[in-house]
Image (tube, rainbow, N blue to C red):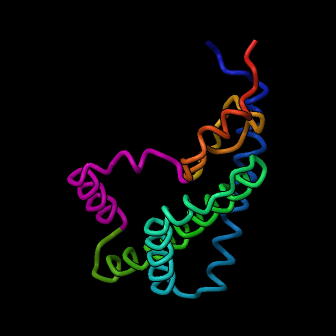
């Protein structure tokens, strides 16, 4: 089955560039707010760890009505992505450290690839940090929520198939 050309056009000509611009400007704002890469590394790691450890707290305090739950999940996803972006930017300090040690970019790439393959995490390189999904829900271009405890409510938003 071929994908819908209109959906592909919207995703790749409008939504993806808009998402890239949004997160790029967010990264620039984080640079101004937090400062150097080492501080972003600490803040990003601490906020990512807090979100993971407090997942059950967020789950237990989730609203039960559909519009409120969608807002809650969107805010949660934004915090997860913002934390990961902050941590990602902070990891640039490792790159700078390796360059200062006399390694070139190709050496850093080879070392990183070897480490990822050894730890079986190389598939993470192949996924984009932001992926817009085209699904059958009423809000067709919304990424899948990482706050995955509302399957019953989200099934109400499914469009009937004909």
- Seen in the image, is 74 located left or right of residue 105? right
Of 5 and 149, nearer the camera is 149
Q: Which residues are magenta?
A: 105-129
Q: Quadrant of residue 141?
A: top right
Residue 22 to residue 15: above or below: below
The magenta stretch spans residue 161:
no
Look at 35% across and 77% down and name the residue there.
99
Rendering coords of residue 60 (x, y %): 55, 60
Residue 90 to residue 17: above or below: below
Q: Quadrant of residue 136?
A: top right
Rendering coords of residue 45 (x, y %): 44, 75
Look at 65% across and 55% down and name the residue there.
73
Residue 36 to residue 10: above or below: below
Of 33 and 135, nearer the camera is 135
Rendering coords of residue 123 (x, y %): 37, 45
Count the labels in the image.
0
> Which quadrant is the N terminus positioned in?
top right
Rendering coords of residue 74 (x, y %): 68, 56
Q: Quadrant of residue 137?
A: top right
- Seen in the image, is 97 located left or right of residue 159? left
> Which quadrant is the C terminus positioned in?
top right
- Seen in the image, is 95 located left or right of residue 159? left
User: Chief secondary structure of the magenta span?
Assistant: helix
């Amino acid at each position: 089955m071929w994908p819908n050309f209109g959906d592909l056009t919207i995703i790749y000509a409008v939504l993806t560039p808009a998402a890239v611009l949004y997160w790029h400007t967010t990264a620039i704002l984080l640079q101004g707010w937090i400062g150097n890469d080492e501080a972003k590394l600490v803040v990003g790691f601490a906020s990512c760890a807090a979100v993971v450890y407090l997942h059950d707290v967020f789950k237990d305090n989730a609203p039960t009505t559909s519009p409120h739950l969608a807002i809650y999940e969107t805010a949660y996803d934004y915090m997860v992505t913002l934390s990961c972006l902050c941590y990602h930017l902070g990891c640039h300090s490792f790159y700078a450290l390796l360059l200062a040690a006399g390694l070139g970019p190709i050496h850093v790439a080879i070392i990183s690839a070897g480490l990822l393959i050894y730890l079986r995490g190389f598939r993470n390189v192949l996924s984009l940090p932001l992926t817009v999904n085209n699904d059958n829900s009423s809000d067709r271009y919304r990424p899948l929520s990482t706050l995955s405890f509302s399957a019953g409510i989200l099934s109400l938003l499914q469009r009937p198939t004909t």
